[in-house]
Amino acid sequence: MLIPFSVMGCKNKDDKTRESDSPEIVDPSTPIDDIEENEYKKIPCYIYSKLYEYNSYKAVTSGQTVSSSIIKVTQSINTVVIKSEYGYTKNESHSNLVNTVHEAYYKDNKVAYKDDESKNYSVSSLDEYLNIYGIYPFDAAIEGYSINEDSIFSVTRVSKENSTYVFKVVFDNEKATNNVKIQMKKFGGLDDYPSFNLIEMTFTISSDFTLQKIDLHSKYKAKKILTTDCEQNYTVTYSNYNENIEVPNLEQIKPLFN
């Protein structure tokens, strides 16, 4: 969901601090049909726990954010995330007002990254990076949103067809969004952190909790000079589990981690 690195100095009293999520530990080998409805709030933890088990996968996001104020602006969302020996993400967002490209490689608590048309990568610790960008794509969260039970408003099972299940999750607008707000403010060049009104995700998963796709729908207010109402819709498609996945330009990047 999309500036160069600088050493942190004095922070404004209203600046947010990155939060580390610590969701409940669950066993993703639990049969999905054994989970009672009153325990459905744990479903995102099962999904994350299964995702964590895989050595590699690819997640591709496509969608848009539409904002309305004086004029209507459509912002594209295109993201690629690869989990492998070296983690990788490329986050692109374009409109006639804002164009951002953020690319990052992760390994051993180090990050090499660059923004927009910068030719050179900055290298920092993961903690330093997260203080600025908020989200690590392989963190104990989903799409940057907290999956602790108190961060989730409701979970319902939408359908079951053969070995494919669909669950709808409604997140708490405040408790789930701390790190997402940090990233959105940074990538969007916002004057303040966004304020959410609605966050819904629909998860399509296999019977062993393996993610097939996520459909996200959210509504929020964002301020960049003017306050605008924004509606975001995107789909994340997962593939290539435990396969050898080519990470773009990896051989050029490896020396930065030495």
Image (tube, helix red, strand yellow):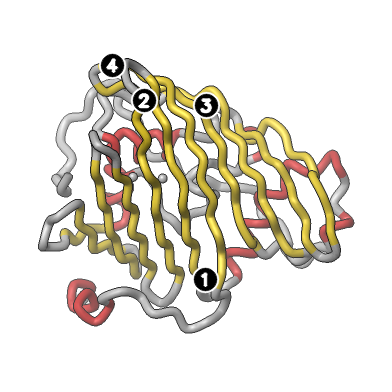
Tell me, yes or no, whether the two marked residues, 4 and 2, touch with CB atoms within 8 Å. Answer: no
Answer few, some or many: residues within 10 Å of disc 1's Cα (few below 14, many 20 plus, some between 14 and 19). some
Secondary structure of the residue carrying tag 4 is strand
Residue under circle 4?
Answer: 226
Mark number for residue 95? Answer: none
Left or right for 98, reference 121: right
Secondary structure of the residue carrying tag 2 is strand
Q: Position of residue 233 (x, y in %)?
A: 51, 40
Gap in angstroms between the C-alphas marked 4 and 2: 13 Å
Gap in angstroms between the C-alphas marked 3 and 1: 30 Å
Gap in angstroms between the C-alphas marked 4 and 1: 39 Å
Q: Nearer the viewer, mark 4 or mark 3?
A: 4
Q: Earlier in the sequence, mark 1 or mark 2?
A: 1
Residue that appears at 39% across and 22% down: 68
Q: Quadrant of the N terminus?
A: top left
Q: Earlier in the sequence, mark 4 or mark 1?
A: 1
Q: Earlier in the sequence, mark 3 or mark 2?
A: 2
| 37 vs 33: above or below | above
User: Of the residues shown, which amino acid type is indicated by label 2?
Assistant: Lys
Tell me, yes or no, whether the two marked residues, 4 and 3, touch with CB atoms within 8 Å. Answer: no
Residue under circle 1?
Answer: 57
Q: Position of residue 242 (x, y in %)?
A: 56, 79
Mark number for residue 174? Answer: 3
Gap in angstroms between the C-alphas marked 3 and 2: 26 Å
Residue under circle 2?
Answer: 72
Gap in angstroms between the C-alphas marked 1 and 2: 36 Å
